[in-house]
Structure formats: C-alpha cells, structure tokens
Amino acid sequence: MAYKKQYQKKEYAKTEERDYQQELTNKFITRIEEAIACEEQGLKWDKPFFSCNEWPRNALTGEKYHGSNVATLMTEEFSDPRWMTFVQMQELSKKMETPLHIKKGSKASYIMKVVPAYQKDSDGNVLKNSDGKATPILDENGNPKIGFKWYPVFNACQIEGMPPYIQASKEVKPAEEIELLSKALQERTDLKVEHSGISRAYYSSSKHLVHMPEPGLFKSSEAYADTLLHEFGHSTGPALGRKMGNGFGTTEYAKEELIAELTSSFMAVELGIPHNPSSHENHAAYLKSWLSALQDDKTLITKAANQASKATEYQIEHLEAYKMTLQQKNEQAQVMADQAIATAKKGCAISM
C-alpha cells in the first residue's frame, strides 16, 4: 500500500511538470516533418500516424476511449489496444486471481479527462453554495468552465501476468465495407455521393454532396477507400456543428482537413481496412498546412482528434443502424420465402 501511494504521488506530480498536449503535438510534428522530407527527396513515406490498428479500450471495463485520448494512445508504440491505470491493474489482478505487475522501466502514457472548474478559497478548498453544491467558475457567457486532468495509464504489453492479446480474425473486404458505409450515410443522412471523370475529390457542404473520381482512376481500391473516407469525414461537419467553407491556407481550413484525415484514420481502424494517408491527392499541401498550424497551436491536435472521434462515432452509429435494418429485411424476406415454399408444398400435396 505504501508503494502504491508513493507511486501515485510520484506519477501525479509529473502531470504538474509536463505539458502533455505539447508532447502529443510534437509527435505529430515529427512525423509530418519526416513525411515532408521524404516527399521533397522523392522518397515514399508510408509510415502511419498511428501504431495501433485497433481502437484503444480499457483493459478492465472493455470500454473504448473517446476524444483526443484515442489519438494519444494510438500514437504510442504498442500494437495491443488494451490500457488501464495502476489502480485498475490491481482490480483486474483480483478479478483474474493472477498477480499483475508493471514491468520494470515501463513509462506511463497520459490520458485526459474533462472536469468542471470550481471556485476555491485561499487554502485550495472548493467553495460551496447555499445548496451545499460546489460553486462552478463561469466564463464571460455565464457557462461553467471546464478544466483538464491527466491520468497515467499503462499498456497491457507493459504488465507482467497479462494474457497475450489475440486479435479477432476478420476477413475484411474494403470495397464491401466502404460500399455499406456509403449506402448508410446516403440513406440515413441524405448525403449525396456522385462519381465522374473529373479527377478531383471534394465535399460540398451547401449541397451535402461528396464528389469522387471514378474508382478506376485510382491506383488501388485502398487508395479509393482512403480518399472516400477523408471526404466522408468532411461530410459529418454540418451535423456535428463544425464551421465549413473556410478558404485554403487559413488555420480553419487546415484544422478541418486535419479532422477529416484523423477521421479517415479512425474509420479505417473501425472498419478493419488498411490506411495510407499519402494516397490523398493534396497530401503534400495538407502536410505543410498542418505543420504550420500545429506549430502555432499546441491544442490543435487535441481539438481535431476530439472532433474526429465524434465524427467516427457518428458514422459508425449510422453504419450499425443500417446493417441492422438490412438484417431485418433479409430475415423478413427469408420468412416470406419459407412461407411461399410451405404453401407451394401444401398445394402439391392437396393436388396429389
């Protein structure tokens, strides 16, 4: 117990000294600089932004992480998607009836939790109102302010005694997955998707329309999927309240493009299909705009990742609902077919 308190004190003390948003930003800046250097030298850069190809989740509860924590954990050099705090490791140890220990030399990763900001007195005690509730700090519009707390988590690979992670085998057909997603968004969000010989992909917010070059104009089905997922990322903007239509070269434009690219990465993980960001036609220009924007604002990647997480959840929700509708229709069709066969057999028996 003494070790636990000492460890927690040590780890939480670090959160006061380190700037985790800047650290995450620096990771992206480094990878973007690598990509730009490769492209300027005529070399191929296909290193993904994210090391893990599965959505990160809590090892104890099984719940998926959300918001910017998705990007934070997926950029770590671990292929195992399972994470947990020191306390959760102890809980899981009791549940499994197996000793679990953090491997020597392991360093924690830090996830962010949004917390309300409360008024405090000179001694640091939270002030309470007449109802006995904590008094929130209000912004200029009278809305409660929020703050952030950072918590250390460890990957399952860093914990001795954890059973090895076995990835569920899933035969993925990119073309079929993308087609289902496209139909789901068209049917459930009134999105229009058109193809033509024009070799430019884009999303029109005024028409709620995604334009794509004909699939045959792409180098591969994966390249087509990457580009379409990027544009689908843009298409979530109006529904999720993002400001659209900013001109190229502006910070707002760079942010929206970063949101769309992160969304396409997240969606590729959810759908289980390969992702190669360099396949996008404006990749080089986007890299430079992202680099400039990230260097100017350390919170940009956190904000963009949070929006991308929402955009991904929005699309997956519609996709799952669409699949369920298809399943119900197929089941109904099967019932009707079985009834027709039974009626036909009955008619044959009577005629005989």
Image (tube, rainbow, N blue to C red):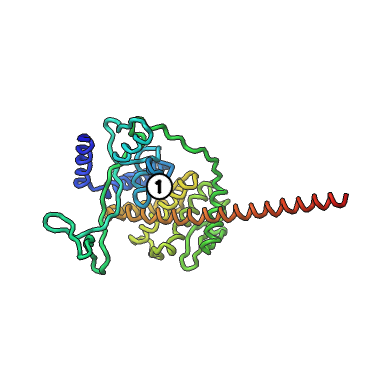
Disc 1 residue crowd, few under 14, some 14–19, many 20+, Cα 10 Å = some
- Horizontal relation, residue 94 to residue 348: left or right: left
Q: Quadrant of residue 51?
A: top left
The image quadrant where one finds the N terminus is top left
Is 349 or 317 nearer to us in this picture? 349
Residue 112, given in percent of the width and then of the height, sits at 30, 49
The residue lying furthest to the left in this view is: 122
Q: Position of residue 144 (x, y in %)?
A: 26, 63
Residue at numbered disc 1: 64
- Residue 43 visible, this angle: no
Task: Tell me residue 59's x, y (percent).
Answer: 38, 40
* Residue at (26, 50) in percent of width and height: 149
Front in this rendered view, residue 67 or 287: 67
Q: Nearer the viewer, residue 226 or 86?
A: 86
Q: Quadrant of residue 90?
A: top left
- Residue located 27% across and 30% down the image: 104
342 with respect to 297 (left or right): right
Outermost residue on the right side: it is 352
Query: Mark 1 is on which residue type?
Result: Lys
User: Tag 1, which secondary structure?
Assistant: loop
Front in this rendered view, residue 332 or 20:
332
Q: Residue 276's image quarter?
A: top left
- Residue 260 at what x, y percent from top left? 42, 55
